[in-house]
Every structure is written in structure tokens, then in C-alpha cells.
Image (spheres, grey):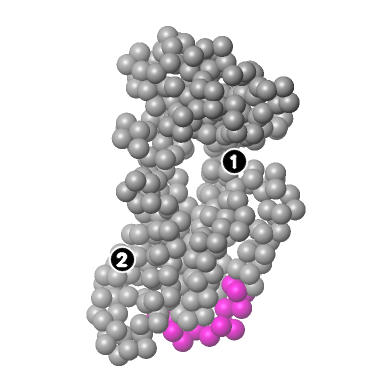
Amino acid sequence: MGQCVRFRDRADFHVFAASWIGGMLVFARRTPHWYADVMQEDRLVEWSTAVIFLIAGATYLRRALKHRRLFDGLVGLFLVFVAGEEISWGQRLLGFVPPSPFLAHNTQQELTLHNFADVFGKPKWILAAVLVAYGVLLPASQRWTAMRAAATRVGATIPSRDLVPWYVICAALLVWYPVEFTGEWVELLSSTVFLAAAELRGAGFWLRCAAGFGAAGGIMLATGALRGDVRHIACARLEASALLHDIVPGRAANPSLAEPEELDKRLLSAADDGYLDFVMLDSLNRVRCPGEPQEDAVARREYGVDPWGTAYWLRTRSDTVGGVGLEVYSFGPNRRRDDNGSDSGGSDDVIMSGRYVP
């Protein structure tokens, strides 16, 4: 199924995919600050990726149920899984604190499986492997009669040959990573390639894409409007201020904190890399947040997490007199980075600033 589609039959998609890649590379080179802002978590690119992966998964699952196609069902479940992982299964949307194993061992301290680096390695290798296996090796195997028969028996929809180059290109870009945040826009392109493989008719594909981008834009606007509980905001300010006190005049900072010209890490990652001594966060542990049970606060602070279940971050910039400008910050009520080190309007990030001299 799908092998009869010729390259010119889907010219609009090929133009879109090529334009997307070229546009992102130019965007990254010409306006790096705007590019970095657009590629942050919970912005249009990430939400569009999640929604279109979900739509593609639902398309495969519908076909699998209607025609009893087992393999298509497995592909659909994988795509739905990717959509859920992309948004941390609603953690940042709902603002809950994930279980402690995710805070301790997940590289992003989120409710995701693919960020357990010790188990799965780098996420980009997983997606690249799937793209090659499904979009390249599976179509190639159909040259043999036995493999075509096997694909029919298990109910596999084979990606059409005209899409094979895009599976290759997506995988290659993930491996090459030519610019920062390449993975973010390649994931979105990959979701559209899977959708194109599932829905062969042009109108059906573009309607689904339009619905995905529209839904993503609506979600982004809704999350951006979150204002949060005033008690949580007050708590985050108290905790960020206490963290700053522990690091600047306190004992939590190690001399290596002043070595990098720039540093921007989750608090726990900074400790794991030797920049901080986590057991010396005395002021943080003495904070009493209004309305929050102390046992809940202790559990959060053990892993450097704010009241919305998102990591506290540490940002430094070296100065010319041997010290570093330092910021401790939380993403705030909307659970996304609104401030990238500049005065950006509309930010609800909770930021406390100081200066550290080793």
C-alpha cells in the first residue's frame, strides 16, 4: 500500500519539506536569538510536533482497527507514545511534580522515558533508528517476494518510495545536528513525514496538518496565559532567593562555578557536574512556603524542583574582574522558559540575580 505513489504526485509535500529545512537553517544562522526563543519547550514547534504525531498515530490506529492490521496498530501506538513523551505526558501543562525516580535519574527531570540517558542513550539516536528502520529498510525489503508476503500478513502499511529520501534526510540531520536545536524542528518534520505515509491523499494530509498547527497554537496561547496560584509564586520567590543566598555568600558554590564563560543548567545538573554542593543548600531547606505541607517541599527541594514540578535553573556569565554574574530562576506558572538572558516582555519567570566571586 502506498508504493504506487510517484514523486511528482506529492510535489507539494516535497516543496514543503525542502523549504522547512532550508528555512530553519537560515533562521538559525541569521537570527539566532529569535530562533532559540522559538525552539524552546512548550512553544509552537514543540506543541505542533506533539499534536501532529498524535494525529498520525490516530490515523494509523484507525486503519489498524478498521482493517485488522496489527503492524499498523503498533506503529500508531508508537506515534502516540512519541506525542506523549514530547509533552512529558502533560507534566508541564498541568504543573505536577513527577515521581522521585524521574527527578533523580531523568536528564530533564520530567515524566518521560526517553530521557533516561543511562538506559536509552541519547533520544536522537532512538528516533533516527526508527526513521531508518521504518522509512528506509522496510520499503527496501519489499523487493523480495517473501518480505512482501510477510508485510501483508502482519498488516504493515509500507511507506511509499517517494518518502524514503525524507526519512533518510531526517535521520541524517539528527546525526549531523548542523545547528543548535536541530532536533526540535527535525522532530516536527518527522511527524509530517509519518503523517504523509499514513494519509496519501493531498487534501487529507494538509487538513490534518492545518488542524495540528491550529491546535498547537491554541494550546500555546492557553499555557502562556497561565497566571498560577499566588502562593506558588511567593514560594518560588522565597526558594530562588534562598538558593541565591546559599550560592553567592554561602558554601554551596564550588570554585569551578567561575570557570565556564557561560553556564545555563538545571540546578541538579549543575551539582552533578561539580559546580554546586547540594548538601550545602541550608537556606533553601529552611524556607517555609505558605500553604504547602513541609514534607512536599522537602521532596521537591531534594531534587531542585519548583512548586510547579519544573527544575530550578542556574545561569552564570563571567565578568572582567574575576567574578560571575549569577541568576537562579524558575520557569514560573506557565512552566516554560520566557526569559533567555535578556529583558523579554511578558516573562513570568521567577529570577533572582547576584554576583559570585570565588
Find the distance from the CA under tag 2 to the CA under tag 1.
32 Å
Q: Closer to the camera, 291 or 323?
A: 323
Quadrant location, the N terminus? bottom left
User: Which is in the foreground here, disc 2 or disc 1?
Assistant: 2
Residue placed under numbered mark 1 in the picture: 221
Percent from the top left, x then y, of residue 124?
Answer: 46, 56
Q: Closer to the camera, 86 or 180?
A: 180
> Compared to 77, does 199 lie above or below?
below
Q: Write the residue at 32% across / 31% down.
A: 100
Which stretch is magenta? Answer: 1-14
Kind of element beneath mark 2: helix
In this picture, residue 221 sits left or right of residue 124? right
Q: Earlier in the sequence, mark 2 or mark 1?
A: 2
Percent from the top left, x then y, of residue 233?
Answer: 53, 19
Q: Closer to the camera, 193 or 242?
A: 242
Q: Is residue 275 magenta?
A: no
Q: Is residue 271 visible?
A: yes
Residue placed under numbered mark 2 in the picture: 73
Q: Is residue 192 visible?
A: no
Q: Amino acid at mark 2?
A: Gly
In this picture, residue 185 sits left or right of residue 78? right
> Compared to 85, does 160 lie above or below?
below
